């Protein structure tokens, strides 16, 4: 990802495709990525709808939740990627604080013998798990290609991406180990292990119902994620058709995402199955194969330029 952006400073993902493959083929690939971003928007909106209906407001029609959430995300997307990323830093601070507080309050409920025996599963199971995590959430940093033109120092994304991935990996590992230590075998069958773990918090019968904080953190993160995907899909479509503004497309894309989110999955377990078995293959094409192919074609055809080492280091 960083090598591709480094060869095409000041360009977002869709501009890179046209620079490398030409106008016609570049637009076709860009259209495929618009479909991918729209699909991920709908999938994540469906996750939000299922979470709210299953755990917070069971009698609320899913369409109400989907439309309300998409209107808010569309408003955020209309402010541009700079505004969304500034909000993202605030959400990062809040969610990190909530995660640390929850882990501290759950310390007395942890039984680390639940982590044993370790490494007893077949090797293909670990490979499958690694592919899943590589696709979701780590491969999803592809959407930050859309912010590349806004990055200073020649569009060098290597340092922030690596730091962000490391923070995400450490946080994810800590949450997974915490959930297993608290829930034991229940962690493997619960649809939302973190939510089930946080519901165990009861400190001196005073601090209870901390699961509300988890719900807020989850909604904050999904808002940020869906807004970025929403923005990427809309601005990609605007670039393909050479439109001067993307904002008037937001209601149209929002309507498509709303309908798509309601028909793409049925029950929440169907969503879980898709996430466990289908998404690694589906996302690998967009997050791995096509970016790598684009980089190879760019190198072979001599498209773009290489950032000097002094400039990259700056």
Image (tube, grey):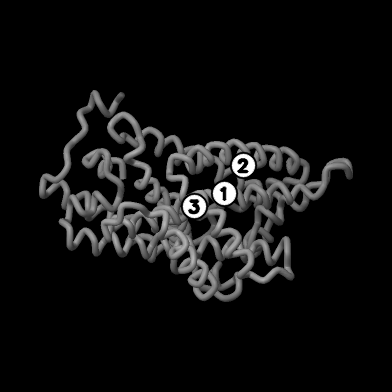
Q: Residue extending furthest left? A: 301
Horizontal side of 90 relative to 249 (left or right) equals: right
Counting residues from the N terminus, which is met first, the one under dot 2 or under dot 3?
Answer: 2
Question: Residue 210 or 17: which is nearer the viewer?
Answer: 17
- Identify the residue shown where x is 17% and y is 51%: 20
Instruction: Choose top left, top right, bottom left or bottom right for residue 132.
Output: bottom left
Question: Residue 19 or 138: which is nearer the viewer?
Answer: 19
Q: CA distance from mark 3 to mark 1?
A: 10 Å
Q: Is residue 248 above or below residue 108?
A: below
Point out which mark residue 95 bears. Answer: 2
Q: Quick one: SS at disc 2?
A: helix
Horizontal side of 86 relative to 306 (left or right) equals: right
Counting residues from the N terminus, which is met first, the one under dot 3 or under dot 1?
Answer: 1
Image location (x, y in percent) of residue 112? 68, 46
What residue would you read off at disc 1?
A: 221
Crowd tier of the residue under label 2, counting other residues whose Cα lies within 10 Å: few below 14, some 14–19, many 20 or above = some
Q: Is residue 81 above or below residue 312?
A: below
Q: Quick one: SS at disc 1?
A: helix
Q: How many marks?
A: 3
Point out which mark residue 227 bears. Answer: 3
Image location (x, y in percent) of residue 247? 42, 54
């Amino acid at each position: 990802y960083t090598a591709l952006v480094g060869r095409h400073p000041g360009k977002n993902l869709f501009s890179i495709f046209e620079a490398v493959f030409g106008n016609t083929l570049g637009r076709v690939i860009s259209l495929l990525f618009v479909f991918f971003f729209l699909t991920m928007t709908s999938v994540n909106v469906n996750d939000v709808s299922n979470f709210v209906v299953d755990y917070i407001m069971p009698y609320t029609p899913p369409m109400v939740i989907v439309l309300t959430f998409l209107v808010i995300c569309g408003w955020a997307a209309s402010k541009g990627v700079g505004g969304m990323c500034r909000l993202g830093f605030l959400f990062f601070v809040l969610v990190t604080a909530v995660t640390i507080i929850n882990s501290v309050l759950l310390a007395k409920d942890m039984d680390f013998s639940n982590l044993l025996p370790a490494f007893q599963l077949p090797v293909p199971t670990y490979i499958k798990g690694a592919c899943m995590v590589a696709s979701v959430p780590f491969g999803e940093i592809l959407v930050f290609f859309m912010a590349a033109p806004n990055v200073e120092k020649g569009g060098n994304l290597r340092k922030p991406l690596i730091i962000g991935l490391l923070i995400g990996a450490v946080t994810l590992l800590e949450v997974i180990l915490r959930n297993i230590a608290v829930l034991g075998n229940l962690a493997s069958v619960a649809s939302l292990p973190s939510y089930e773990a946080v519901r165990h918090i009861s400190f001196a019968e005073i601090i209870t119902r901390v699961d509300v904080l988890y719900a807020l953190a989850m909604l904050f993160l999904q808002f940020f994620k869906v807004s970025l995907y929403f923005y990427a899909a809309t601005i990609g479509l605007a670039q393909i058709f050479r439109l001067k503004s993307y904002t008037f497309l937001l209601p149209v894309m929002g309507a498509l995402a709303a309908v798509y989110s309601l028909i793409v999955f049925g029950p929440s377990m169907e969503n879980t199955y898709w996430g466990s078995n289908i998404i690694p293959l589906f996302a690998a094409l967009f997050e791995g194969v096509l970016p790598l192919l684009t980089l190879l074609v760019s190198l072979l055809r001599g498209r773009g330029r290489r950032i000097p080492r002094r400039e990259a280091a700056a």
